[in-house]
């Protein structure tokens, strides 16, 4: 695609990146067929090809309107289009650039600005988010049905293993996950403990930065990333150095794997950020190395059918497919993928709050497809997907690692 960038962005870091991405796009339209919002709305401007054209216009100096902003806001950033694209267009990175420019040019209504402020300042801070969530859970019977649906049931984490092992890995606690689903990281720690790996939490690590980044607070997001790098760096070298930084939430994983790119311009952090990204592994990339031990320990104990929802941040963002299913099948689980398993469930970080109508339509479509598998349990690999899906069904929705952890616990009982 030919470009003629405006002076305000030409020859800048963002401008050079955007120009390279735009020039890679051949406007073939394959991406449109796999775009969830285009399928719902049928508007070319609510599909990747149309949004690319809008961003091109913005970067070439065309007037920016609230309508432009609305079309970009309605994108889930699921990156299904990147999986489909035959030209390797890095749509997600282009969208970040376009959204940042539009955010600077279009002033949002006061109510919308307030809602976004609460999300970007409240959710990444556990000391604010956790008490607020707990209050909502305690007052659940007094709330309206829509509000009750948004609140997950109160959950508890099991014990964290105390044994030391020669093999050590870090895990990101995250910001929302410890409150929303506190058992996930504890389950991962217990499963890894069973195969001889110690999972460690760096006390000063927090939000991965994804939440603020996707709400167009990019500088604040970069500060979140720098803080995590500082917290993890002492564990990277020396005696007892960690082997990997494990992500149990694929939404965090896709962002941490981008640290090297996002901080490439920062002389003080660029090299460290690259190293952190290199060390980052989704849990589904780590456990297959221990498949033989798990099969031996769990032989005949996991004969159940589950429907697996692969998060977009795993299958499209990280391009990881088949690993969760493969491991679960190896230990005896009957794993079913639903029709159109490549499509987003509508969670997408804060999307389910900011674009509620579209998010609910996507959720209900996904739940209907999952129900068609006949499975009595749904599993996923990202806390946002779990909470969003659970809000629309009585079928249990769990993280896949909790299945293995429960089976190991039953074995030891």
Image (spheres, helix red, strand yellow):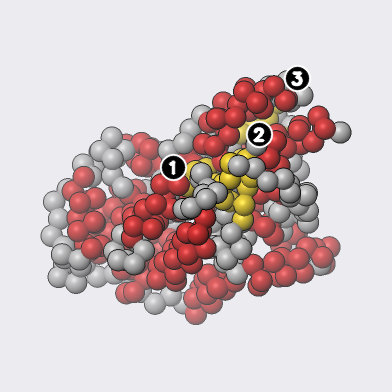
Compared across the picture, whether 2 is left or right of 168 comes to left
* Residue plotted at (78% across, 49% down): 158
Q: Position of residue 244 (x, y in %)?
A: 51, 45
| Tag 1 secondary structure | loop
Mark 2 Cα-neighbour bin, 10 Å: few <14, some 14–19, many ≥20: some
In this rendering, does residue 372 appear at all? no
The answer to which of 72 and 253 lies nearer the viewer is 253
**Distance CA(mark 2)–CA(mark 1):** 25 Å
Mark 1 Cα-neighbour bin, 10 Å: few <14, some 14–19, many ≥20: some
Q: Which of marks 1 and 3 precedes in the sequence?
A: 3
* Residue plotted at (75% across, 19% down): 300
The answer to which of 255 and 151 lies nearer the viewer is 255
Quickly name the residue at label 2. 195
Q: Which of marks 2 and 3 precedes in the sequence?
A: 2
Quickly name the residue at label 3. 300
Q: Nearer the viewer, mark 3 or mark 2?
A: 2
Query: In the image, which disc is placed on residue 318?
Result: 1
């Amino acid at each position: 695609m030919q470009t003629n960038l405006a002076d305000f962005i030409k020859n800048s870091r963002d401008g050079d990146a955007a120009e390279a991405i735009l020039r890679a796009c051949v406007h073939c339209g394959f991406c449109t067929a796999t775009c969830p919002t285009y399928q719902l709305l049928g508007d070319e401007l609510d599909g990747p090809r149309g949004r690319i054209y809008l961003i091109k216009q913005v970067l070439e100096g065309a007037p920016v309107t609230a309508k432009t902003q609305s079309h970009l806001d309605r994108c889930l950033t699921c990156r299904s289009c990147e999986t489909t694209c035959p030209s390797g267009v890095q749509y997600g990175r282009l969208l970040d650039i376009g959204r940042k420019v539009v955010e600077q040019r279009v002033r949002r209504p006061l109510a919308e600005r307030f809602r976004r402020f609460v999300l970007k300042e409240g959710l990444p801070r556990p000391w604010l988010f956790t008490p607020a969530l707990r209050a909502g859970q305690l007052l659940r019977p007094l709330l309206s049905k829509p509000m009750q649906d948004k609140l997950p049931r109160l959950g508890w984490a099991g014990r964290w293993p105390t044994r030391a092992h020669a093999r050590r890995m870090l895990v990101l606690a995250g910001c929302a996950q410890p409150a929303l689903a506190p058992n996930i990281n504890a389950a991962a720690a217990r499963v890894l403990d069973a195969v001889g790996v110690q999972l460690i939490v760096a006390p000063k690590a927090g939000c991965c930065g994804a939440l603020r980044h996707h709400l167009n607070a990019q500088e604040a997001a970069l500060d979140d990333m720098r803080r995590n790098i500082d917290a993890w760096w002492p564990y990277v070298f020396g005696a007892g150095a960690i082997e990997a930084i494990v992500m149990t939430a694929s939404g965090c994983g896709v962002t941490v794997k981008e640290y090297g790119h996002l901080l490439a311009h920062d002389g003080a952090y660029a090299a460290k950020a690259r190293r952190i990204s290199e060390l980052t592994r989704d849990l589904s990339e780590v456990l297959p190395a221990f498949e033989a031990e798990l099969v031996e320990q769990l032989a005949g104990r996991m004969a159940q059918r589950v429907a697996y929802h692969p998060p977009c941040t795993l299958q499209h963002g990280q391009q990881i497919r088949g690993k969760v299913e493969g491991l679960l099948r190896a230990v005896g689980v009957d794993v079913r993928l639903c029709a159109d398993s490549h499509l987003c469930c509508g969670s997408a970080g804060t999307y389910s709050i900011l674009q509620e109508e579209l998010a609910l339509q996507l959720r209900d479509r996904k739940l209907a497809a999952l129900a068609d598998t006949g499975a009595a349990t749904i599993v996923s690999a990202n806390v946002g997907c779990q909470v969003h899906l659970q809000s629309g069904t009585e079928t249990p929705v769990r993280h896949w690692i909790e299945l293995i952890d429960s089976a190991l616990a039953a074995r030891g009982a």
